Structures are given as structure tokens and as C-alpha cells.
Image (tube, rainbow, N blue to C red):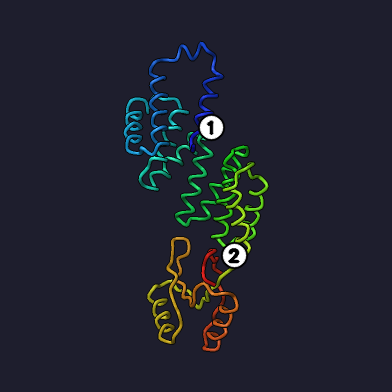
């Protein structure tokens, strides 16, 4: 079912070729197409091992000489058959970058967005899914991309964007797609409940030892203190107290710390839907 759209596209492309060209197609090209179609059938039937073996054979015999459209299909299938997420990602990226004009670019972008969502890389998920909608505006996958944009935006704490994507998805919903409609309704019902959460920051240090000393002292005073590690983009070690607090809780904690002689301020954190409040 998943690849029916692509099989139909392939049939249409062959149907519009002049009959003389079809008759003149080299035997090697016919074998190329036949073997790659076999890989796809095996993948659809869940025969992953046999599909990988057939794809390896195709790559050995035709991979270096096949037309770009066939290579894009092979990369797409390699992504579907990959045993590791990182390997699938590389193959889908190759489809997107080198085979963007093939029938597989939109599906590759959707899968990349879903993979990044599963990896909790929500901003990257939104980036891939937004590109799908921008580069393939008539794709039948465009409404589903909105569903994952809504999920990713909600996970980032962007309730406004999450709700807007869900509402747009309902407007673009294909007829009789009750499963997708139900998913959009669920997103629409929950996106407005996404709220900001906070932590309280006390200081930032260039040296980790100084940050750890302050955090230990705060822990000794009964505070839930922790150190946000430095990164290449942010080279400071930040000492914070409390995690995922609602604004009133964070402000009360900041007032208490200020009374104890510290100089606290609130830092917002996006809350993911489903958290205990």
C-alpha cells in the first residue's frame, strides 16, 4: 500500500514514452528496472532480508551506470530497508539532495521529519517537513507533514504554531481519511494545553569547578541545584535551581533565593505535552 503511488507514477512515466523508445530499450535497462521493482515488492511484503540482498545485487550490477531516477529509487529503498536510523537518514538525504526531482523526494522528507521527531530533534523535524510543503506543494503527503509539524511544534512549546498546523491540516484533509482526521483532532485538542515551564538561574562561570562548587553549596541548603554544561556555542557553565516549574512556582523560588542573598532570574523551558503539571 505504501508504495502504490510510486508504482502508479512509474507506470505513467513508461506509458508516455514513445513506443519506439520502449522497444529500443536495452536489455540491461529492462533488467535494471525489473530487479529494482523486485526489491520494492519484497520490501512491501516485509521480506527485508531478501530485499537487501536484491538491492545489493542491483547496486553491484547497475548502481554506477543507472539513470538518476533509478538511483534515487535505490537510495529511497535503501533508506526503507536500513537497519540503523543513521543509515536510513543518509539515504533519504541523498534522495533529497541528489534526486529531488524524482518521485521519492517528498516521501524522503516526510521520513526524515519523522526520524528527527523520534530523535527529539524537533526543530530539524520542522525544517524537513516545512521543506516538503514548500518544495512539493501538491504532494499528497503535504497534509501528513502538517501533522508532524504540529507534533514537533508542540514538543518545542510553540503552541501557536502547533494549533495553526493542526487547523490547516484539517482544512487540507483528503476525503474519507478518518485516521488522519482523528490524529489532527487529537493535536488540535492538546496543542492549546502546551505551557511554558521555567527554571531559575543564579550564575554562569567559565570554569566548571566554580559552577559545581556553587551547585554543591545550594544542594547543601536544600535546593534542587544543577549545572547546565557548556557547549561550543555557549561556553559558560550555568548554575540553575529547579526544573520544569510553572511560572508561579519559579517566581516563588526566585524570591526565596533573592531573600537568601542570591541574584536569581527566570529562564523559560518548553514543556512537552504529556508532562505531569
Q: Nearer the viewer, residue 165 or 50?
A: 50
Give x and y (percent) for residue 52.
Answer: 34, 36
Q: Identify whether 161 is placed above or below 108.
A: below
The disc at residue 232 is none
Residue 251, image quadrant? bottom right
Q: Nearer the viewer, residue 190 or 176?
A: 176
Q: Is residue 105 left or right of residue 221?
A: right
Residue that mark 1 sits on: 101
**Residue drawn at 36 percent across, 37 percent down:** 47
**Residue drawn at 56 percent across, 19 percent down:** 16
**Residue drawn at 59 percent across, 54 percent down:** 150
Whichever of labels 2 and 1 marks the residue nearer the N terminus, that label is 1
Q: Nearer the viewer, mark 2 or mark 1?
A: 2
The disc at residue 194 is 2
Dot 2: few (<14), some (14–19), or many (≥20) neighbours within 10 Å? many
Query: Which element is circle 2 on?
Result: loop
- Quarter of the image with the C terminus is bottom right
Give x and y (percent) for residue 72.
Answer: 45, 32
Q: Nearer the viewer, residue 209 or 266?
A: 266
Give x and y (percent) for residue 88.
Answer: 41, 43
Q: Are marks 2 and 1 in contact (CB under 8 Å)?
A: no
Q: Identify whether 204 is placed above or below 73.
A: below
**Residue drawn at 53 percent across, 76 percent down:** 200
Amino acid at each position: 500500500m505504501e508504495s502504490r503511488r510510486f508504482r502508479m507514477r512509474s507506470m505513467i512515466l513508461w506509458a508516455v514514452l514513445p513506443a519506439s523508445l520502449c522497444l529500443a530499450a536495452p536489455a540491461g535497462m529492462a533488467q535494471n528496472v525489473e530487479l529494482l521493482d523486485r526489491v520494492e515488492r519484497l520490501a512491501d511484503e516485509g521480506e527485508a532480508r531478501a530485499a537487501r540482498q536484491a538491492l545489493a545485487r542491483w547496486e553491484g550490477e547497475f548502481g554506477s551506470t543507472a539513470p538518476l531516477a533509478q538511483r534515487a529509487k535505490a537510495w529511497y529503498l535503501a533508506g526503507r530497508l536500513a537497519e540503523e536510523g543513521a543509515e536510513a537518514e543518509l539515504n533519504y538525504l541523498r534522495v533529497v539532495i541528489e534526486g529531488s526531482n524524482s518521485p521519492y523526494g517528498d516521501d524522503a522528507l516526510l521520513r526524515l521529519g519523522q526520524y528527527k521527531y523520534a530523535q527529539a530533534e524537533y526543530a530539524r523535524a520542522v525544517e524537513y517537513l516545512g521543506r516538503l510543503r514548500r518544495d512539493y506543494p501538491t504532494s499528497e503527503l503535504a497534509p501528513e507533514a502538517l501533522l508532524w509539524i504540529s507534533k514537533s511544534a508542540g514538543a518545542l512549546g510553540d503552541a501557536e504554531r502547533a494549533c495553526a498546523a493542526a487547523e490547516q491540516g484539517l482544512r487540507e484533509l483528503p476525503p474519507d481519511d478518518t485516521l488522519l482526521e482523528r490524529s489532527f483532532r487529537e493535536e488540535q485538542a492538546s496543542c492549546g494545553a502546551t505551557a511554558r515551564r521555567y527554571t531559575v538561574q543564579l550564575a554562569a562561570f567559565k570554569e566548571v569547578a566554580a559552577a559545581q562548587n556553587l551547585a554543591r553549596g545550594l544542594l547543601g541548603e536544600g535546593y534542587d541545584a544543577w549545572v547546565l554544561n557548556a557547549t561550543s556555542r555557549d561556553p559558560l557553565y550555568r548554575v540553575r535551581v529547579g526544573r520544569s516549574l510553572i511560572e508561579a512556582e519559579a517566581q516563588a523560588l526566585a524570591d526565596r533565593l533573592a531573600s537568601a542573598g542570591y541574584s536569581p532570574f527566570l529562564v523559560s523551558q518548553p514543556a512537552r505535552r504529556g508532562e505531569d503539571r
